[in-house]
Image: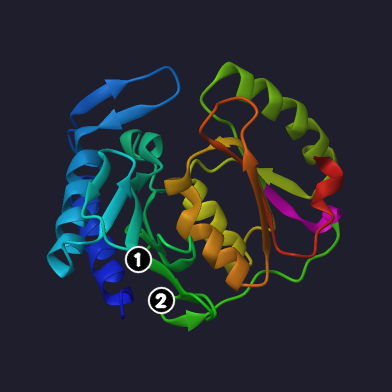
Amino acid sequence: MNLLPVALDAATQAGQLLRQHFGGPLKVNELQAHDIKLELDVRSQRLITDIILAHDSSHAILGEEEGDLGGDGDIEWIVDPIDGTVNFFYGIPHFCVSIAARQRSSGEMLLGVIHDPMQQETWSVLRGEGPLLNGRPIACSARHELADAVVTVGFSKSREALDAGFDRYKRIACAVRKTRMLGSAALALAYIATGRLDAYIEEQISLWDIAAGVMLVEAGGGRVHTSPSKVKPGSLFICADNGRLPISALL
């Protein structure tokens, strides 16, 4: 079962849709205190869904925008049609499409694809194989000292998550070389897998934000810890790193 071409096709076509509309007028479906939902999120999700189900209508799809779709087969796709929607809305060219697939019966992840349409970068990984960026092998960095590390910290959407994140951020910022706040969880993980970043921490994140990226990091030699978020039921806390940093000391 070769699902990677399907994922790459869906991610690339959705990315083309986003690139075509970047910087133009956008329809806002919902404006929240710390988030924005665009009509384009839904269009991107539907485009991805149509491509996947045209391949096999028995496949299921867990997406950020429209919940559970598709059939009741053993393959489930996990889709974020625009990761970094606020960046997209404000004209910041740092966002991506994230697609992963897993086997329902075992829970085992099968593949992950992250596509950045603005940089024309596509990360991919298959279970049991190494991660690729535009078809070339990549790996996490070899940095092992916190003083040498660049760490990205995500600040989530609730007051509780923000408060917890600020406390941790102060500890991290004093211990590492630099911190960055980039606005896309999927790209943060892809950057760790590529060696551009060394760690990523966020208090409150959803599965579709990180499913593909977790596969990339682990396949690239890194490690990822997730646990139920203490600030929002149903979401996750994540700490990912290159596999060498003593990042747990800052948690």
Q: Nearer the viewer, mark 2 or mark 1?
A: 2
Q: Amino acid at mark 1?
A: Gln
In the displayed structure, does residue 136 sit left or right of residue 3? right
Q: Residue at x 27, y 76 (%)?
A: 5
Which residue is nearer to you in this view: 93 or 230? 230
Question: Who comes first in sequence, dot 2 or dot 1?
Answer: 1
Vertical arrangement, residue 162 with respect to residue 108, above or below? above
Stretch in magenta: 146-151
**Location of residue 31 in the rendering, given as x and y in whole percent from the top left corner:** 32, 20
**Location of residue 136 in the rendering, given as x and y in whole percent from the top left corner:** 47, 82
Q: Residue at x 84, y 39 (%)?
A: 174
**Location of residue 187 in the rendering, given as x and y in whole percent from the top left corner:** 49, 54
In the displayed structure, does residue 176 sit left or right of residue 204? right
In the displayed structure, does residue 215 sit left or right of residue 38? right
Residue designated by label 2: 134
Residue designated by label 1: 120
- Using the rendered view, name the quadrant where residue 148 is placed: bottom right
Image mark for residue 159? none
In the displayed structure, does residue 101 sit left or right of residue 65? right
Residue 150 highlighted magenta (yes or no): yes
